[in-house]
């Protein structure tokens, strides 16, 4: 499906919106036919941000593809937003958890550790620094990524961070709730520790994180659709 067609479909869906809105263009495969052409057309029409993923089989970009997107966005003055988690590390841990039949909600945090988020954030920052383009790291869940952002900003690199209410108000202890209740607190990156929570609040106060947003993507707990 062409990026242009997806954007047009979302504009049509949003036509009845009662509030201001903006669209971030998700790029999951910049190598497909017309992808670059469609992105350039969108930029010309005023769309100014692109979201990319470093994880999830259906969405993740290879390193070379991420560099291509960063370069294209730099040439058009667009902001790149990145969901930063190390896909290969997460997949490696997940396979071993599944083999051991560790499938309770609490293992979600084990499968997607803070260092997997830190590694991917460091890599994305390095790429953005090399290309010379701003970058917004979304869904920052704890102090390790805050540290990566802070170090980059101290070097004068335009790196920004977003966190979410779930990371500011909930901890990984919620994943341990009995009777399947822990499943209601699954998100990626996963909830972290109380120490991470305190570090996020401090980062907001210092201006190291500039955005708080819901990242709302709710699912019906009965399992019959979103």
Image: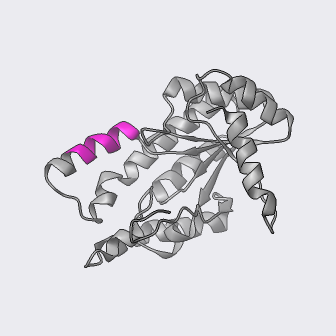
The quarter holding residue 193 reads: bottom left
* 177 over 77 or under it: above or below: below
Residue 70 horizontal/vertical position (percent): 65, 30
Say whether residue 156 is visible.
no
Residue drawn at 79 percent across, 35 percent down: 42
Side of 50 where 151 appears, left or right: left
Dominant SS in magenta: helix
Residue 101 horizontal/vertical position (percent): 15, 55
- Nearest the viewer among 155 and 53 is 53
Chain part drawn in magenta = 87-95
* 161 over 123 or under it: above or below: below
Quadrant location of the N terminus? top right
- Nearest the viewer among 141 and 58 is 58
Task: Give the total of numbered labels.
Answer: 0
The quarter holding residue 208 reads: bottom right
Given the current orientation, which residue lies at the most extreme left position? 100
Side of 206 where 107 appears, left or right: left
Residue 202 horizontal/vertical position (percent): 58, 68
Side of 50 where 144 appears, left or right: left
């Amino acid at each position: 499906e062409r990026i242009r067609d997806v954007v047009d479909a979302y504009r049509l869906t949003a036509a009845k919106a009662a509030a201001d809105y903006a669209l971030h263009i998700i790029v999951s495969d910049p190598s497909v036919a017309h992808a670059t052409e469609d992105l350039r057309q969108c930029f010309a029409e005023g769309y100014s941000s692109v979201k990319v993923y470093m994880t999830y089989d259906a969405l993740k970009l290879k390193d070379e593809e991420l560099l291509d997107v960063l370069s294209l966005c730099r040439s058009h003055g667009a902001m790149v937003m990145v969901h930063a988690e190390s896909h290969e590390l997460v997949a490696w841990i997940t396979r071993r958890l599944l083999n051991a039949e560790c499938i309770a909600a609490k293992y979600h945090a084990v499968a997607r550790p803070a260092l997997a988020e830190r590694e991917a954030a460091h890599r994305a920052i390095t790429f953005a620094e090399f290309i010379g383009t701003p970058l917004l790291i979304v869904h920052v869940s704890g102090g390790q990524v805050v540290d990566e952002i802070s170090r980059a900003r101290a070097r004068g690199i335009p790196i920004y961070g977003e966190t979410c209410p779930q990371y500011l108000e909930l901890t990984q202890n919620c994943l341990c709730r009995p009777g399947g209740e822990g499943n209601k607190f699954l998100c990626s990156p996963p909830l972290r520790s109380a120490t991470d929570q305190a570090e996020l609040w401090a980062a907001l106060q210092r201006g190291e994180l500039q955005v708080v947003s819901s990242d709302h993507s709710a699912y019906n707990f009965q399992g019959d659709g979103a």
